[in-house]
């Protein structure tokens, strides 16, 4: 697979930037990481940096592709959680830092994602948000229970309170991990902090994100989010991946008059056709 990456992070109207991001690309796939350190408590930047550092170290030790992607993502966040607790205890005096976390793993033409807190993952296809994570936040809980309207989620006084995070408390974090999703060329996977997504609606992001270079688009959206939130703009960060090609670099498609060696064998070709038919009519068969 071939990718285009984009990344941006702006300070906003804050004294320090507590967001941290990473793009880890290996021969077997790619992993995107974003953490938004919890404000109001000391060490938010320490927690987010430890999240990124721990995951980077783990992938150096255990390169992609992951054999069990869902368990792999869960374990990455569990290890990052304990590394953050340890980093906090090493401070003088000890502190209890925390951060949100969102990861996206891309390998074998599929994507998986995991998150804790209110930093989000989006999958945009043809400008539409095909998938989006559901925030682990107090306001999202009120909305899902029907106690407030969607309009009131944007100005609720507790909109920045998360119900889950990495670090902060000793018990293991409750991580939400997705099922695998088949990717298509042109798909854009976006990870962003609440300072990025909150001032922008999903349609506005989708309309812009497929235009031009990905890094330029993210920078422009971040600037819009920052301007819309002035003078109370939060740290505004995003990292994204665009699927440029599902083919491996250097692999050529055989010309029409030359059979593909992978399907030249009659038995292999027949099996491939049967498998394709099963996939095509799987939903109809299930309905019966």
Image (spheres, rainbow, N blue to C red):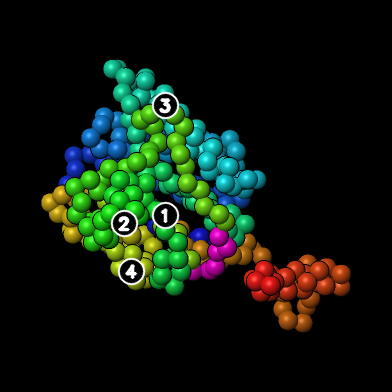
Q: CA distance from mark 3 to mark 1?
A: 25 Å
Q: CA distance from mark 2 to mark 4?
A: 23 Å
Label 3 crowd bin: few (<14), some (14–19), many (20+), radius 10 Å: few
Q: Which residue carries the number 4 mark?
A: 203
Instruction: State the image coordinates of residue 240 (x, y, percent, origin top left).
Output: 42, 57
In this view, 81 is above or below 120: above
Label 4 sits on a secondary structure element that is: helix
The quadrant in which residue 17 appears is: top left
| Depth check, front residue: 29 or 143 | 143
Q: In this view of the protein, can residue 256 be seen by the observer?
A: yes
Q: CA distance from mark 1 to mark 4?
A: 15 Å
| Depth check, front residue: 35 or 162 | 162
The answer to which of marks 3 and 1 sits earlier in the sequence is 1
The answer to which of marks 2 and 3 sits earlier in the sequence is 2
Tell me the mark number nearer the camera, choosing from 4 and 3.
3
- For the residues labelled 1 and 4, say whether their Cβ atoms are less than 8 Å apart: no
Tell me the mark number nearer the camera, choosing from 1 and 4.
1
Instruction: State the image coordinates of residue 266 (x, y, percent, origin top left).
Output: 86, 73
Q: Is residue 75 magenta?
A: no
- For the residues labelled 2 and 4, say whether their Cβ atoms are less than 8 Å apart: no
The answer to which of marks 1 and 2 sits earlier in the sequence is 1
């Amino acid at each position: 697979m071939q990718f285009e990456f984009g990344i941006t992070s702006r300070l906003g109207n804050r004294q320090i930037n507590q967001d941290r991001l990473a793009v880890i690309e290996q021969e077997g796939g790619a992993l995107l990481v974003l953490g938004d350190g919890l404000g109001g408590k000391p060490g938010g930047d320490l927690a987010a940096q430890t999240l990124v550092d721990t995951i980077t170290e783990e992938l150096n030790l255990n390169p992609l592709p992951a054999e069990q992607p869902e368990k792999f993502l869960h374990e990455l966040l569990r290890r990052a959680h304990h590394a953050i607790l340890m980093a906090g205890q090493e401070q003088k005096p000890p502190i209890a830092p925390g951060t949100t976390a969102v990861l996206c793993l891309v390998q074998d033409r599929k994507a998986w994602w995991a998150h804790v807190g209110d930093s989000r993952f989006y999958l945009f296809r043809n400008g539409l948000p095909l998938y989006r994570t559901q925030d682990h936040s107090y306001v999202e809980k009120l909305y899902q229970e029907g106690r407030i309207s969607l309009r009131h989620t944007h100005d609720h006084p507790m909109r920045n309170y998360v119900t889950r995070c990495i670090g902060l408390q000793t018990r293991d974090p409750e991580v939400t991990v997705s099922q695998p999703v088949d990717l298509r060329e042109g798909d854009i996977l976006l990870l962003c902090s609440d300072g990025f997504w909150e001032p922008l609606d999903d349609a506005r992001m989708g309309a812009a994100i497929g235009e031009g270079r990905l890094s330029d688009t993210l920078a422009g959206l971040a600037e819009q989010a920052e301007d819309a939130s002035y003078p109370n703009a939060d740290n505004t960060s995003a990292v994204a991946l665009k699927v440029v090609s599902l083919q491996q670099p250097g692999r050529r498609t055989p010309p029409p008059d030359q059979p593909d060696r992978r399907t030249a064998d009659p038995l292999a070709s027949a099996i491939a056709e049967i498998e394709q038919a099963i996939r095509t009519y799987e939903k109809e068969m299930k309905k019966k």
